[in-house]
Amino acid sequence: MTSDGDDARGATIPDATLVLLNRATLVQHTVRTAVHELNNVLQMIAGSAELLGSAALPPAAAARVETILKHSSRGHTLVQSVGELAKVATPAARTLDLGSLCDQALALRRYEHKRAAIAATLERPPAGTALVRADGALLLQAILNLVVNAEQALAGTAPAVLTIAVTARAGQVEVIVSDSGTGPADRDRLFDPFVTTRAHAAGLGLTTARLIARQWGGDLEALDGSRFRLTLPATAPAL
């Protein structure tokens, strides 16, 4: 169980900051995917135009082909420029103790839990036994998203209980975040971006958490409306 300790306001992560992080992560992923697909389309257009250009065409048709090639090349340059804008620093993969990261996430939300009368507990294996390879900042963001999602589900609930359980088994480490709320009535679109039934929520947290998990070879699934399981491949301790 996490201890209350001294709840300094400066030790928290504001919800607005998490919303911005989620939005930035989702936009980056969407833009990079779009750039890849648009490049494929432009390459097909340019390839087809080159084949037409190699045939004996009337002058007017040949001029049209040249126009297609010119503008497809320009489009490729523009798309690459957009892709460069979407780039951020390469995520730094390192060995992380997932139990310690969950402990850190709860510590960052301790003030909010005390203010909302949420009892938060962490069940974790011994240190050094739930190791994964990922970017620490991104993975912490994913866990915080799950914690904030549980907090929002607990609004108006008494008693309000939030539990994180970390286990390492069969080559993977899993984190189950559960709450004592009833969960949303519509569970079919839990991971769709911008879909939310809660006031002042952006509808990005679960979407972004799943993207981050999959980026590092894992996944995020809903066991039911109030329990979410994040899994990542286990890694051996660094020698």
Image (cartoon, rainbow, N blue to C red):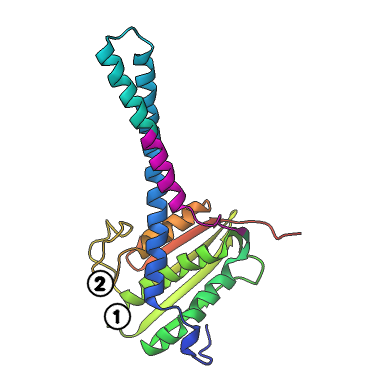
Q: Is residue 161 left or right of residue 124?
A: left
Asked which secondary structure carries label 2, the reply is loop
What type is the residue that disc 2 sits on? Arg
Predominant SS along the magenta part: helix
The image shows residue 210 at horizontal and vertical percentages of 42, 57
Q: Which residues are magenta?
A: 74-93
Is residue 91 in the magenta section? yes
Q: Residue at x 38, y 68 (%)?
A: 20
What type is the residue that disc 1 sits on? Ala
In this rendered view, identify the residue nearer to me: 7 or 228: 7
Q: What whole-number distance in Å separates the C-alpha atoms at marks 2 and 1?
A: 10 Å
Q: Residue at x 34, y 85 (%)?
A: 159
Asked which secondary structure carries label 1, the reply is loop
Which mark is first along the chain, 1 or 2?
1
The image shows residue 141 at horizontal and vertical percentages of 47, 67
Q: Is residue 180 visible?
A: no
Q: Residue at x 23, y 61 (%)?
A: 186
Is residue 100 in the magenta section? no
Q: Residue at x 27, y 9 (%)?
A: 58
The image shows residue 185 at horizontal and vertical percentages of 23, 65
Looking at the rendered structure, the number of numbered marks drawn on it comes to 2
- On residue 198, the disc is 2
In this rendered view, identify the residue nearer to me: 87 or 75: 75
Q: Which residue has dot 1 on it? A: 155
